[in-house]
Amino acid sequence: MMTKTAKHSTTSVWDADMELLSRPQLQELQLSRLKNLLFYLEENNLFYRQRLKKAGIASGGIHSLDDLRNLPFTSKADLQEKYPSGLFSKPLNELSRLHASSGSKGRPIMVGYSKKDLSTWAQVCARSLVCAGVTAADIIQNSYGYGLFTGGLGVHYGAELLDATVIPASGGMTKRQISLLQDLRSTVLCSTPTYALNIACTMEELEIPLSAINLRLGIFGAEPWSEEMRKLLEEKLSLTALDIYGLSEVIGPGVAMECPHSREMKGGLHIWEDHFLVEVIDPETGTLLTEGEEGELVFTTLTKEAMPLLRYRTGDIASLNWQPCPCGRSMVRMARVKARLDDMLIIRGVNFYPTAVEEILLTCPELSPHYLIVIDREKALDTLCLQVELHRQTAHNWQKLAETDEVFRQQEQLRSEIKKLLKDMLFLAAEVELMPPGSLMSTEAKSVRVIDRRTAVRPD
Ligand code: DLL
């Protein structure tokens, strides 16, 4: 186990007692925690007391982990309906902290933490950072937003717990972020992948060489990102990019983390199963899926006090992998989340996820991977316009040619190439608009990739 005071420690497991448990031992622990959770909910949580009663489940009714399947699901709609505190097990004034998810779709979701929850959260974040290869000797630039969003404070307390040095940079002010990277020689960058790309592109614009910074690890998450994006970030920032997953409802960042071994094998992210019991279900039927089958991730929080959740349907799509990992951790791995169920777009009968567009754009060197999908409806027909930023070099080359026929020819050729790729790979017919560098770059905590005008109210 990594000692918290020894700087420069190189051992790579934070909590060996848990992370290396054998599966039977882990299952025994999960079962006992699940039983306790049901008793706790019956005593402290009106919402679940009523729901379990309605489902005919007594708190003593759990005898094996399979009995989990008899428990009712909890949905995002439940949390939205009971906003702000209807699923809390403690009164608001007894909580230690509150966070909220952005609520970009519908009502926001409020999440509460007791002192014990905050300690658990710091533990799972420290565990995640160590799993990525962070040590007490690292200087972590934490560019996740601080505030109601869980990214900033979640990672912050994990980093402090493992005794690393933390720079609470939060998001935005990109030039200052770059100065911090240069002046403080940060070794680890924690941010959304799109914000990391923003930093990399701004460095290029300012002609700051890679040798001016000292990053070795990027811990990126909070939104879906493709393998192509990973390659690009690793090249542009000269680091190893690893995926961290989590959601406010369950705890925040630190639900699952990719280790470097798993990154190499594309084996997925270790889920901290002693705290978060995971299932993958068919989103249509609710049936449990088996190893490798892609479906909706569902979590039961085994140790939370303020807002425990039973069988919470995340809307995130992934599969599970129980194969042993060379890092030695026994905890199951989840495939990288490519999308949320509600991110799927349907245009004239063609289904696709925005990340599929990202993968295509990253194969065109003339472009930068900042894009916006604008969907509209004309005369009952859906239209799709893909706005995509030019790479700085492309824009520069075209500027040199001024407004000559040659530039128009090259622009038309590039637009046609993108259209053809979208047609061939995704069966999508789209208009393509080439945008100047920097015009679509995200400075938000999470990037906005889609504007769907079909749902907007408009006069006839
Ligand atoms: O995004 C927590 C977080 C902060 C995770 C920092 C990682 C790093 P929410 O704002 O509640 O919480 O959003 C949760 O974001 O259900 C997924 O749809 C998506 N998401 C989170 N991590 C990943 C990831 C934070 N690594 C929602 N890959 C989740 C893909 C992710 N999607």
Image: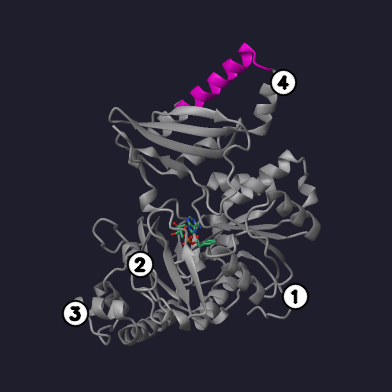
> Can you tell which mark lies on residue 56?
3
Which one is earlier in the sequence, the residue at label 3 or at label 2?
Answer: 3
Q: Nearer the viewer, residue 130 or 113?
A: 113
Q: CA distance from mark 1 to mark 2?
A: 42 Å
Can residue 118 be seen?
yes
Q: What's the magenta region?
A: 402-419
Q: Secondary structure at mark 2?
A: helix
Q: CA distance from mark 4 to mark 3?
A: 74 Å
Which one is earlier in the sequence, the residue at label 2 or at label 4?
Answer: 2
- Here the colouring is one colour
Q: Nearer the viewer, residue 196 or 284?
A: 196
Which one is earlier in the sequence, the residue at label 4 or at label 3?
Answer: 3
Q: Which three-letter amino acid code belongs to the residue tagged 1?
A: Lys
Q: Which three-letter amino acid code belongs to the residue tagged 3?
A: Gly
Query: On the rendered image, what quadrant is the N terminus found in?
Result: bottom right
Q: Does residue 405 belong to the magenta stretch?
A: yes
> Can you tell which mark lies on residue 236?
none
Give percent across and percent down for residue 79: 35, 67
Q: Which three-letter amino acid code belongs to the residue tagged 4?
A: Lys
Determine the main secondary structure of the stretch shown in magenta: helix
Camera-near label (1 vs 4) is 4
Q: Nearer the viewer, residue 9 or 180?
A: 180
> Can you tell which mark lies on residue 79?
2
Give percent across and percent down for residue 416: 49, 22
Q: Does residue 435 belong to the magenta stretch?
A: no
Query: On the rendered image, what quadrant is the C terminus found in?
Result: top left
Which one is earlier in the sequence, the residue at label 1 or at label 4?
Answer: 1
- Residue at 46 percent across and 81 percent down: it is 93
Decide: marks 2, 4 in contact (CB < 8 A)?
no
> Which residue in the protein does label 1 denote?
7
